[in-house]
Image: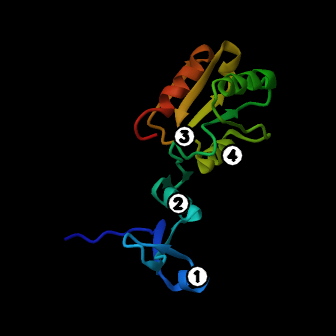
Amino acid sequence: MAIDRSVEVGHIFQLGTRYSQALDARYLDANGKDAPMVMGCYGIGISRILSVVIEQHHDDSGIRWPAGLAPYDVEVVPLGKNIDAEAVDAVASALEAEGLDVLVDDRPGSAGVKFADADLIGCPVQVVAGRRLTEGAVEVRTRDRSTVLEVDITDLTKTVQQLLTRPGQ
């Protein structure tokens, strides 16, 4: 026998006939006899589910959202003071056009702050738009860093979709 830790995310309460008798909720059984309904209720704790997901999918830098539960599929992280905002918007729009939910960190700030915040938020895929954007390339990486690729922007949506559908994402 093994004992493991667990978290209750759902529950069942067997209420019996306590409330059905008080409400006079009745039915006819198979023999045609009048009887009080036997009641129960079921519950799933949405906030508990999120806590369990975060507890199971995190590291020292933050959340590592599974692709199916992530609030956003991709975070676009523009870097550099002279980054072309229209080119960054085009990258985000191309991803959104394929049905992906995209978060763009358009705040001014250092690369270190943006990377730390991107990891804290935990989108499954990060697209880093830096100095190579003018040459038509971006860096694509998974939140867990198991994959880091330099990708031509013409292949970006296909690459991101493949990463999101990989087992374990």
Alpha carbon of mark 3 to alpha carbon of mark 2: how far? 18 Å
Where is residue 61 shown, x and y percent of the image? 55, 52
Residue found 38% across the figure and 69% down from its top: 30
Q: Which residue is mark 1?
A: 24
Q: Residue at x 71, y 32 (%)?
A: 79
User: Which residue position is annotated with label 3?
Assistant: 124
Of the residues shown, which amino acid type is indicated by label 4? Answer: Val
Of badges 2 and 1, the one in the foreground is: 1
The image quadrant of residue 160 is: top right
Kind of element beneath mark 3 = loop
In the picture of the structure, the residue carrying the numbered disc 4 is: 113
Mark 1 or 4: the one toward you: 1
Q: CA distance from mark 1 to mark 4?
A: 62 Å
Q: Which mark is residue 49?
A: 2
- Whichever of callouts 1 and 3 sits on the residue coming sooner in the sequence is 1
Dot 4 or dot 2, earlier in sequence: 2
- Going from N to C along the chain, the mark reached first, 4 or 3, is 4
* Apparent side of residue 116 relative to residue 3 in the rendered image (left or right): right
**Contact flag, marks 2 and 1 (Cβ < 8 Å):** no
Question: Residue 14: where, in percent of width, then height?
Answer: 45, 77
Residue for point 50% across, 45% down: 66
Query: CB atoms at circles 3 and 2 under 8 Å apart?
Result: no
Q: Amino acid at mark 1?
A: Asp
Camera-near label (1 vs 3) is 1
